[in-house]
Image (tube, helix red, strand yellow):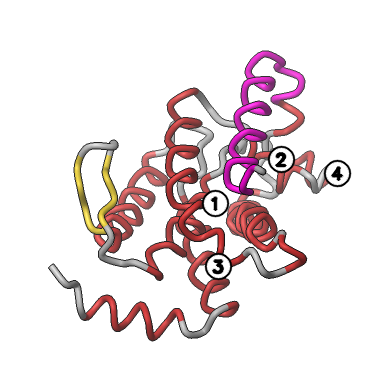
Amino acid sequence: MLNHTTLIIIITVIVSLLAWQNKTLFNRLIFYPPAVNNGQWDRFVTHGFIHADSMHLLFNMFTLYFFGRAIEGLYQPFLFGYGFVVFYVLAIIVAMIPSYVKNKNNASYLSLGASGGVSAVLFAFILLAPWERIYLFAVVPIPAILFAVAYIFYSIYADRRGGSNINHMAHMWGGAFGVIATIVLEPKVLPHFINALLSPGF
C-alpha cells in the first residue's frame, strides 16, 4: 500500500504533466485572483498541483519525498488516518492567503506550485530533527536548521526579485504553518526542538 507522501507525489506529477500538455487545463488550475473572486475557490488547492517547469517540479517532489516520509507518521493518527494529507493541503491553502489578500485585485497576478505544502513538511521535520543533515542539491550536507535559515533568506530575495509565477513567499507562510500546526497537534515537539537545538551532538 502506498504511503500518503508517495500518493501526493504521483498525483502532483500526473497533474503537472497533463497541465503542461493542455494550456486550458493549466489556466484553469493556476492561482488567478479574478477567477477566485468569481467563485473558483478551488484554485487555492489546485495551484499546488501544477508547476512552472520540470526543475520546479523535481525540486519540490524531491524535498517532499524525503521529508514527507520522515514525518508522515506524526500526523497519520489524526482525521481517520488522513491527517498528513489534510495537513499538506491546508498548508497549500494557508500559504496562499497572504498573497491573495495582497493581490486580489491584481489581474496580472498568477501563482503555482506546491511550495506551501512542501515548506510545511520541511519545517515540521526541522522541529523534530534540527541538526539532521539535509543534502543541498543532493550533494552538499548542511544541518536542517541552517538550511531553514538560508531557505527563508532566499525566499525573501527571490520574492523581491520576481520574474516568475513561483510564489516564494508561500515558502515562508507554508513553513510557519508547518511549525504552528505541528506544535498544536503535538505540544511536546517544542521542548524537544529546544533541547535538540541546544544539544547538537556533533
Q: Amino acid at mark 1?
A: Gly
Q: Earlier in the sequence, mark 1 or mark 4?
A: 4
Q: Amino acid at mark 4?
A: Asn
Q: Earlier in the sequence, mark 1 or mark 2?
A: 2
Predominant SS along the magenta part: helix
Name the residue beneath numbered marker 2: 46
- Say the numbered circle drawn on residue 74: 3
Q: Secondary structure at mark 1?
A: helix
Magenta span covers which residues? 2-26
Front tag of 1 and 4 = 1
> Picture coordinates of residue 94 (x, y %)?
63, 60
Name the residue beneath numbered marker 4: 38
Question: CA separation, marks 2 and 4?
Answer: 16 Å
> Picture coordinates of residue 109 (x, y %)?
61, 38
Residue 48 visible in the shown view = no
Residue found at the far left of this picture: 202
Placement of 202 over or under 151, stated as above or below: below
Counting other residues with Cα less than 10 Å from the Cα at mark 3, is it few (<14), some (14-19), or many (20 or more)?
some
Quarter of the image with the C terminus is: bottom left
Name the residue beneath numbered marker 1: 116
Q: Secondary structure at mark 3?
A: helix
Question: CA separation, marks 4 and 3?
Answer: 37 Å
Question: CA separation, marks 1 and 4?
Answer: 23 Å
Residue name at image x 70 percent, y 47 percent: 105
Label 4–label 3 contact, CB within 8 A: no
Residue 18 located left or right of residue 63: right
Residue name at image x 72 percent, y 33 percent: 29
